[in-house]
Structures are given as structure tokens and as C-alpha cells.
Amino acid sequence: MLSFDEYKALIEDNLLSFLPDTGVYAEVLKESMGYSLSIGGKRIRPVLLLASCDLAGGDVKKALPYACAVEFIHTYSLIHDDLPAMDDDDMRRGKPSNHKVYGEAMAILAGDGLLNSAAELIAKQALSLEGDADALYAHSKAAHEILSKAGASGMIAGQTADVISEKSSDVSEDLISFIELHKTSDLIAAPTRAGLMLANAADDMIEAFTTYALDIGVGFQILDDILDIEGDEKLLGKTLGKDSEQGKCNYASVHGLEKAKEDLHKLTVEAKESISKYDSEGFFTALASQLESRKM
């Protein structure tokens, strides 16, 4: 297997090349899409897809379009999250949000463009497998996994629950768990599972890594909630205290900082234990530990 930085380099080297040609009259659309793709990011989701595929013996190069599609989807969600109607944030990764550079209308269109381009990219890769029924089935499963978890029953459901819970005085623990699971964790679990599907991994391996990915995904959002309260604004590259300012309840505000930190650690331990059969002290185990201690 490669290192995290080596998988990330593959993503960085190919990400923009997968953007479609928008035509002479819509060049600003491609520019806007490329702007948000290029302002950095951890690239955890696409790296998880490549690494899980690699671990299960799959072809990383054939998985690359799927990995980049996942980053397209993630980036579109961030562009829309920053809009005034959503989280209303002027900064993203230390640079002006898309709508502050290109205007709200173009930011909406750039997000739309990235989401649709992700679906096109996945479909194009599947079309290249004509005549190979087994590979086509594996790729179709991976495509469905990514697109469904990014959709109305996955990430968008989590975002919806997050929006409608603003300024609510009756936020239950179940609601917070729903938001954490779907808003963030679904799009961490989906690429992990999709990478394994592309490699035709056994069901028990997929099940183990599903537990792993859901745990680190929920933990990722819990830590985001913690950092929104006590993080370093310069390191995070975005405004702190947005949840409190907008009347949003998150895991840390509902359960308290200490409980949030305890639960983050429990999830990290459980994640590592769930894959010990496949990755004892390996890439994924180390990644879980790194994610628990991140500052940005």
C-alpha cells in the first residue's frame, strides 16, 4: 500500500483533469468549480476509497475516477454550505468562500456542476467496462453506494435535519446522532465501502470496514463540533463559533465538551478494533488515531 500523502498526490494530480469542458460561454463555471477544488483540503474521502481498494487487491488507477468523483461531491456540499442561506460563512480553508469570489448564483451553479460531474464521471467509468459483466456489476455497486449516500437519504438528509434544527429548543440526542451520522459519516463510509466493492472484497471485510468508517465519520463530525468551540481559527481556515451564532445545536453543545471528547475516543478505539483482522497497526489504524488528534 501507499502512504496517505502518496494517495493524496494521486488525487491532486488528477482532480482538475476530470472537470468537464463547459464551453466558451460558460468558462466562468469551470473556473468557479476549479477554484473550490483547488483551495486545499484533507482529501480524506477519496484517499479512503483508493486505500480500501488497494488493501483488497483492487486496481487503484481504475478506482481513481470514483475517488475524484467523491471529492467533487464533497466540494459541492461545502460550496453550498457556505452560502448565506445555509451556514453563511465567508471563509473556507483560509480563503474566501466561492460565493464571495464568484457571487451566490455562480456558487450555486458551481455546486450543481460538481455534483452532476461526479455522476457523469462515475457513469463514464462504468461505460468503459462494456463486455466485462463482473467488473460492471462491481462498479455499479460502488456507484450506487456513493451516489445514494450523497443523496436525499444520506448526506442531504443530514444537512436538512441540521438546517431545520436551528434555534430549536427541543433538540434530542437522537436528532444529533442522525445529523452526525448522515451529514458527515455517510460520505466517509461510502467511499470506503465503494473502494472495497471495486476490488470485489468479501462481505465480512466490507462489514468490518463499514463499522470502521461510520465510527471515524461520526468521530470526525464530533471533533468538528469540538473545534468549532475551542479550535484555532487560523489553523481551521474558517470562522469559529458559527454553530452557536446561528443557534445550531451540535454534539458538543448538547453533551458537553468532556463527554464529546470521551465519545470521540471510544469511537476511535472501536473503529480500530473493528478492522484489527485486516489492518492491525496498519494504514487505517494509524489514520483513525491521526483523525482523533487533528487540529484542523
Image (spheres, rainbow, N blue to C red):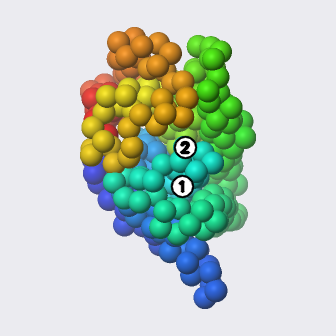
- Residue in the picture at 54% in, 43% down: 87
Q: Residue at x 53, y 62 (%)?
A: 99
Q: In which quarter of the image is residue 170?
A: top right
For the residue labelled by badge 2, is the local secondary structure a helix, a strand or a loop?
loop
Judged left or right of residue 8, residue 113 is right
Residue 66 visible in this rendered orientation of the protein:
no
| Residue 179 seen in this snapshot | yes
Residue that carries the numbered disc 2 in the rendered image: 87
Q: What amino acid is labelled 2 in the image?
A: Asp
Residue 121: percent from left, percent from top:
61, 63
Q: Are marks 2 and 1 in contact (CB under 8 Å)?
A: no
Q: In this view, does 33 lie to the left or right of 85?
A: left
Residue type of the residue flagged with mark 1: Ile
> How far apart are the two marked residues, 2 and 1, measured between alpha carbons?
10 Å
Residue 116: numbered disc? none
Q: In this view, does 159 lie above or below 250?
A: below
